[in-house]
Amino acid sequence: QVQLVESGGGLVQPGGSLRLSCATSGNTFRFNAMGWYRQAPGKQRELVAGINTSGTTTYADSVKGRFTISRDRVRNTGNLQMNSLKTEDTAVYYCSLGFTMSSPMYWGQGTQVTVSS
């Protein structure tokens, strides 16, 4: 059974930073890609950042230069460092695992990120 648990969300002021973490368990080593998605109220879930086993990363244009994704497959963890946060970054953030970045197979329960003054 594959499980993902996110943590690190919260309330932050515009311009601030947060670091999201994703703890994984189960047979996760076979999944090449970890992704971070977000879903704001009334909007579709979107890919924010992804990383594969070769270390190749991808970012949504809206977060390039501000967010950094990382993954430690030995420790079964992943992180999303978010800097220079904007109000439009407010959403529920989900960690995912899959064979490719665009085809997630497992999801965490999500963690709320609210950027507000």
Image (spheres, grey):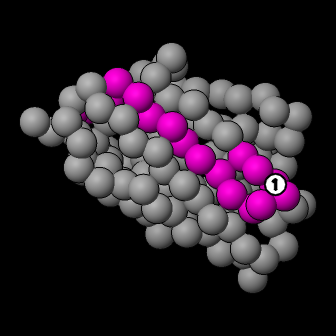
Q: Nearer the viewer, residue 72 or 29?
A: 72
Q: Is residue 19 above or below residue 74?
A: above
Q: Which residue is mark 1?
A: 73
Q: Is 74 covered by the magenta stretch?
A: yes
Q: Does 101 appear in magenta?
A: no
User: Which residue sits at x=19%, y=36%?
Assistant: 13
The magenta-colored residue range is 71-88
Q: Position of residue 108 (x, y in %)?
A: 54, 66
Q: Quadrant of residue 77?
A: bottom right
Nearer the observer, 97 or 67: 67
Which quarter of the image is occupied by the N terminus? bottom right
Q: Is residue 23 left or right of residue 82?
A: right
Question: Mark 1 belongs to which amino acid?
Answer: Arg
- State the image coordinates of residue 40 (x, y, percent, origin top left): 30, 47
The residue drawn where x is 84% and y is 73% is: 27
Q: Quadrant of residue 29?
A: bottom right
Give SS at disc 1.
Answer: loop
